[in-house]
Amino acid sequence: MRLVEHDDAMDLLSGRVYHAAEGFLHHLLDEVPYITRQDGDLVSAWKRAPDAPFSPDAVPVFWVRNIWLEPFLLEFDSISDAARALRAIQRNWAPCPVHYARRTLLIADRLPHIPDRPRTFPFVLPTAPMGAFTLLDEHTLMGSARCSSPFPNGAFAFAENRDEPPSRAYRKLWEALVLAGTMPQPGARCLDAGASPGGWTWVLASLGAEVLAVDRAPLDPRIAAMPGVRTLKHDAFTLRPEDIGPVDWLCSDVICYPEALWRWVERWLASGLARNFICTIKMQGKTYDRATTLRFAAVPGSRVVHLWHNRHELTWIRLQDGNGAG
């Protein structure tokens, strides 16, 4: 079969392919209600019949690094044919080797190169479509031209600052702000709950924001001395919103049970005193509190994601203008 001559070589699928967040395939398998097949960390939920009663967006899925939004199957005769067919669709394709890894990479070698240099914060998310593909057998390719992440297989790296921030947690806030598409402006009033040792406070203050850093543990002295930073030795969760007053950004990387975070956030939502939220939902032990995660996701204007720089945790982003819904 010559792909360039046979449109029926491509079989469009109704559904999604989920690329599990690294190390958390078990959580993803618990989330996906209808699994067609599994190929390594790729979990497929699709049906070939266009009239099948299947809605891929009916159940939220969070433990992913990337979602293939419009999966297809493609039959091909040779590596050249496969590469030519992908190039005819669009420029950018990321290989995801699972089966026939060498053959997958040989196809990728015939596609345009995708730069992988570290990115300097802040930056605007790429708008060019980023596709993904893998091989199911020697002559069958599964791919998607549209994916949820603009980065190859959801992976990217920042040009890190290894001298100023006191921990590497700052990368999570960098990523969340880039994903949100907006960030604190100079003079914005920010609350950093559970701030010690100060990685998130460093990010906010570096942007020119006024930061109230709340924690029972002290901030790194270098961070506490930054312009615009004020510290309060206290348990942030015992402070009432009216004790703090209005804030433009409420940020939390507190180590706590998801339910405790939700109860605190719920008070702030009810008060109307916080415009934008970025909070880490940290799972305890090996468990996944999906019920509480769904409460966060249900807040209007929200999205819950597993950031590339997250560990056993998810990140909740809620913007006043609703852009956090993604």
Image: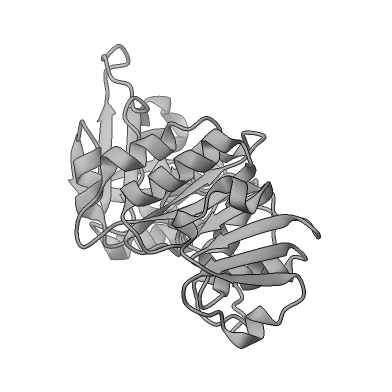
The answer to whether one can see residue 249 in this image is yes
Residue nearer the viewer, 273 or 187: 273
Residue nearer the viewer, 49 or 251: 251
Q: How is the image coloured?
A: one colour
The residue shown at (26%, 15%) is: 52
Q: Give left or right: position of 123 versus 266.
A: right
Locate residue 117, reporting x and y percent: 60, 72
Q: Give left or right: position of 53 versus 311.
A: left
The correct choice, above or below, for 184 with respect to 71 in the image is: below
Residue nearer the viewer, 129 or 126: 126
Q: Residue furthest top?
A: 51
Q: Residue furthest right?
A: 186
The residue shown at (70%, 82%) is: 225
Q: Quadrant of the N terminus?
A: top left
The correct choice, above or below, for 105 with respect to 269 in the image is: below
The residue shown at (44%, 47%) is: 264
Locate residue 321, reporting x and y percent: 67, 34
Locate residue 313, reporting x and y percent: 36, 57
The answer to whether one can see residue 1 in this image is no
